[in-house]
Image: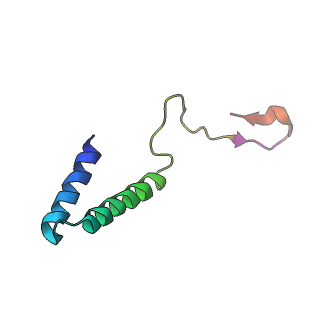
Amino acid sequence: MIPLLLIGATVIGACLVFGYSSIIVGLVLMTAGILGLVAFMSTPGAVLRPGENEVVERRHYIGKHDDHRSYRD
């Protein structure tokens, strides 16, 4: 809800500065959409979704007994 209010305030502010025109409204909405998409795509692992666990580092120990039993999670 808050992002929609911020986009609306941006559109109103741009219309006050540049004049009320459908071109201005379209450009501002398109810019806000592209900016939101870039921000969303640049943070793939920042938020865990329901059912996801934290990333577990898998360690492989190589030594005397180098077989499948030497792998520890």
Q: Percent from the top left, x then y, of residue 26?
A: 31, 63
Q: How is the image coloured?
A: rainbow
Q: Residue at x 54, y 32 (%)?
A: 52
Q: Which corner quadrant of the image does residue 63 belong to?
A: top right
Residue that lies at the very extreme toward the front in this rendered image: 22
Split into 4 quadrants, where in the image is the N terminus? top left
Q: Percent from the top left, x then y, of residue 49?
A: 49, 35
Residue that lies at the very extreme toward the bottom in this rendered image: 18
Q: Is residue 59 left or right of residue 62?
A: left
Q: Is residue 62 left or right of residue 41?
A: right
- Relative to the observer, which residue lies in front, 15 or 21? 21
Residue that lies at the very extreme toward the left in this rendered image: 16
Q: Which residues are magenta?
A: 59-63
Residue that lies at the very extreme toward the top in this rendered image: 51
Split into 4 quadrants, where in the image is the C terminus? top right
Q: Main secondary structure of the magenta part?
A: loop
Q: Is residue 73 left or right of residue 69?
A: left
Vertical comparison of 69 with 11: above or below: above
Vertical comparison of 5 with 26: above or below: above
Q: Residue at x 45, y 41 (%)?
A: 47
Q: Is residue 39 magenta?
A: no
- Relative to the observer, which residue lies in front, 52 or 15? 15
Q: Percent from the top left, x then y, of residue 41?
A: 48, 54
- Please give the count of numbered marks on the rendered protein: 0
Q: Residue at x 45, y 45 (%)?
A: 46
Q: Percent from the top left, x then y, of residue 50?
A: 49, 29
- Relative to the observer, which residue lies in front, 20 or 61? 20
